[in-house]
Image (tube, helix red, strand yellow):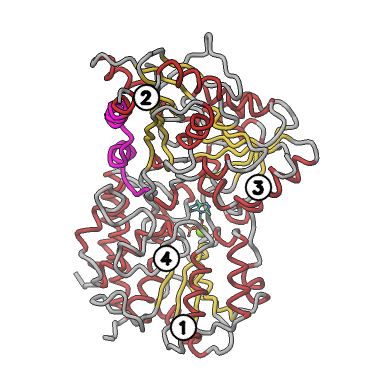
Amino acid sequence: MGDKIATREAYGSALAEFGGDNRIVVLDADLSKSTKTDTFKKKYPERFINMGIAEANMMATAAGLASCGKIVFASSFAMFAAGRAFEQVRNSICYPRLNVKIGATHAGITVGEDGASHQAIEDIAIMRAVPNMVVLSPSDAVETRHAVKAAIEHDGPVYLRLGRLAVPALYSEENFTFELGKGITVAEGTDVTIIATGLMVHTAVAAKEILAGEGIQARVIDIHTIKPIDQGIILKAAKETGAIVTAEEHNVIGGLGSAVAEVLIQNCPVPLKMIGVQDKFGKSGKPDKLLEMYGLTANDIVSQVKEVLKLKNK
Amino acid sequence: MSEYSLNDLKKISYKIRMNVIEQVYHAASGHPGGSLSSADIFTVLYFSEMNVDPKNPKWEERDRFVLSKGHCSPALYATLAEKGFFPKEDLSTFRQADSYLEGHPNMTYVPGVDMSTGSLGQGISAAVGMALAGKLDKKDYRVYALLGDGELQEGQVWEALMAAAHYKLDNMVAFLDYNRLQIDGKITEVMSPEPVADKFEAFGWKVINAFGHDHQQLKEALAEAKKTKGKPTMIIAHTTKGKGVSFMEDAAGWHGTAPNKEQRDQAIAELNAVVLELEGK
Ligand SMILES: Cc1ncc(C[n+]2csc(CCOP(=O)(O)OP(=O)(O)O)c2C)c(N)n1
Ligand SMILES: [Mg+2]
């Protein structure tokens, strides 16, 4: 098992680990202790710039730095990075395809007690809708480390979706490979496929185990790159298992489920069910309690798998 | 409205502070620092200045209040409960999944909350909208807003200040909780908004400085604001973050940290001692 580590924590550590490259500059908006960019700041204070509580200005400033050859990481909560500064990200970063990486922490409802105003459930939808943007959504510490490395190596805008809640390890460094735009088959299965991202990959694995006990063999796929999405792995799963359930800590409108549906409907339509926030705002509460209230548990996945199997076998 | 003596007001402000601590302690999360620094502003607004009716929270003629720095919901909720908008017992449910007392104020569910806030910089714009509506409808209500000094870094704040002066919104008063701290440290070290008074003036606002823990000074500032015609008023309330709890005072670390049991007990003891003293016990 090992210790639980939040992906925001792994993000801060990765910035410090790979931050030796002098082109890297890290910006934050008065949340460096929460986004964990302070881990980088401690090691490379001269390349850390606090922009104050001014996210829109931070994003366009990041664009300017990038236009002068810097690799810029700009961090805030997902709500303010993708939401508050949306149009700066769109017009100043993505349109000129500048080398800015947005480290957006506290995504989804597991923000917990801060409540709806701080729980971004639309960020995948709006970030993936912008041309030139790459959208990454890692599920554990190891994957986050590799996602940060891939973001540095990729020339262009990247949105990194990270969580506040500590999560167990899904992968170990030995024999882990991360390829931008390629999904990972976490577990094989032939009856149905659960395609998940971020925190929900863990939940999908738990659901797979419950299903196995009932004689249903579910494949589990981790989509760490939501855009560009791995069409190959999705279509292979559709052909081989004939039914798909998606799972994400995000609104069911416009997120991973929608991205998967776009691929399926145009190439290989198979029955699909989507697990996610059902077009409602979040609220305050303990993360685990909220996951239950919003239908994001392993049992919720199990029941949707059964529903989708009914459609498959019709 | 019944008149409260300065002694009464002081007692109320310390009861509000105690309920700030209790909420954050029970929730094991939330923002004590800025709630304690603004407790006196809340006290004077709701117990001396504003025309509101706890029995009829949506009364159309009421004065409005917008907590632009929405993270200080514990102070707002404690004040509204003290005023009778909802039962004080509910405060212990703050930030829990089955409660209506969201981490940041939600106008849909909490009686007495006039605007949903939490994302810094937006509340002040909503207050401008309310003041504009008051002018359009030729109503007498007044609109009050509370800003954080770190919040001033949001460009939107200045857009709102510009608009309020442009439309001569003399039915609007904003308070600056000038406690000089934000999350990452001193405002002047993170991203200085100084000189704040000169900037407000340059943006067309009447500026009044007051000691933010002195109820008499806050009352006088509000009276002067009422006399000011043709422009909005900014009351710069000079405060201490964490005011009233010795170990939370002027410490950035208590911005968004909940006290443990021991710290809660000490805080409550310190605050309660002031209440007892005021009651002559
Ligand atoms: C747009 C936005 N960005 C960031 C935050 C996170 N945040 C909450 S409080 C805070 C610091 C506020 O400092 P200040 O305005 O001085 O408040 P006070 O000292 O009165 O508590 C920050 C950055 C937020 N709520 N909204
Ligand atoms: Mg402050």
- Front residue of B214 and A240: A240
> For this view, does B247 lie left or right of residue B8?
right
**Tag 3, which secondary structure?**
helix
**Residues at discs 2 and 3 both on one chain:** yes
Going from N to C along the chain, the mark reached first, 4 or 1, is 4
- Front residue of B267 and A266: A266
Marks 2/3: CA distance?
A: 32 Å
Residue A142 shows in this picture: no
Residue of label 4: B38
Badge 4 density bin: few <14, some 14–19, many ≥20, Cα 10 Å: many
Marker disc for residue A204? 2
**Residues at discs 4 and 1 both on one chain:** yes
> Disc 2 vs disc 4: which is toward the camera?
2
Q: Pointer 4 and pointer 1: residues touching (CB < 8 Å)?
A: no
Residue of label 3: A90
**Tag 4, which secondary structure?**
loop
**Residues at discs 4 and 3 both on one chain:** no
Marks 2/1: CA distance?
A: 53 Å
Residue of label 1: B134
Look at label 1 and name its amino acid: Gly
Magenta residue span: A282-307
> Disc 4 vs disc 3: which is toward the camera?
3
Marks 3/1: CA distance?
A: 36 Å
Marks 4/1: CA distance?
A: 26 Å
Going from N to C along the chain, the mark reached first, 2 or 3, is 3
> For this view, does B239 lie left or right of residue A314?
right
Badge 2 density bin: few <14, some 14–19, many ≥20, Cα 10 Å: many
**Residue A263, x across and y down, in percent:** 52, 30
> Disc 2 vs disc 1: which is toward the camera?
2
> For this view, does B196 lie left or right of residue B9?
right
